[in-house]
Amino acid sequence: MNSVDINGVKTYCFASRGELIDLAFAEKRSLIAVNAEKILHANEKTRDIFNLNIGFSDGIGAVWALKRKGFNNAVKI
């Protein structure tokens, strides 16, 4: 699965909810909603939580950041 590091927060790029659910079950990790505010205000503890789990784009700001990083099929979930 494609992911990118945005301000130290590993954010996965999904084209659909189905892809997100499939990865969560396959890797048996928690889902963490990522939006622009969480990326902007991330500290060491929150980055660890995001990076140990599956961070998915929950806001349009996170989607825009993913698109700027080259993931043109990113969608808000």
Image (spheres, rainbow, N blue to C red):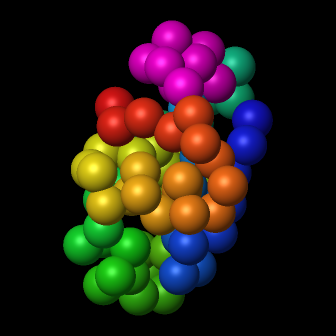
Q: Quadrant of residue 25?
A: top right
Q: Residue at x 41, y 57 (%)?
A: 64
The dominant secondary structure in magenta is helix
Number of marks in picture: 0
56 magenta-colored? no
Q: Residue furthest right?
A: 1
Q: Position of residue 30 (x, y in %)?
A: 47, 38
In the picture, which quadrant includes the C terminus? top left
Residue 47 showing in the rendered view: yes
Q: Residue sitting at 64 percent across and 63 percent down?
A: 69
- Span shown in magenta: 15-23
Q: Nearer the viewer, residue 26 or 60?
A: 60
Query: Position of 5 compared to 56: left or right?
Result: right
Observer-nearest residue: 68 or 20?
68
* 20 sits to left or right of 45: right
- Tell me which corner region of the image, top left, top right, bottom left or bottom right, holds residue 1: top right
Of residues 57 and 68, the one drawn nearer to the viewer in this rendering: 68
Q: Height in image: 39 above or below 3?
A: below
User: Quick check: 59 above or below 61?
Assistant: above
Q: Position of residue 76 (x, y in %)?
A: 34, 37
**Residue 22 is covered by the magenta coloring:** yes
Residue in the picture at 48% in, 87% down: 44
Residue 32 appears in view: no
Left or right placement of residue 48 versus residue 32 in this view = right
Q: Residue at x 63, y 47 (%)?
A: 71
When the figure is inspected, residue 63 is found, relative to residue 17, above or below; the finding is below
Q: Position of residue 18 (x, y in %)?
A: 51, 12
Query: Residue 74: horizontal and vertical position, in percent?
Result: 51, 39
Would residue 68 be found to the left or right of residue 70 on screen?
A: left
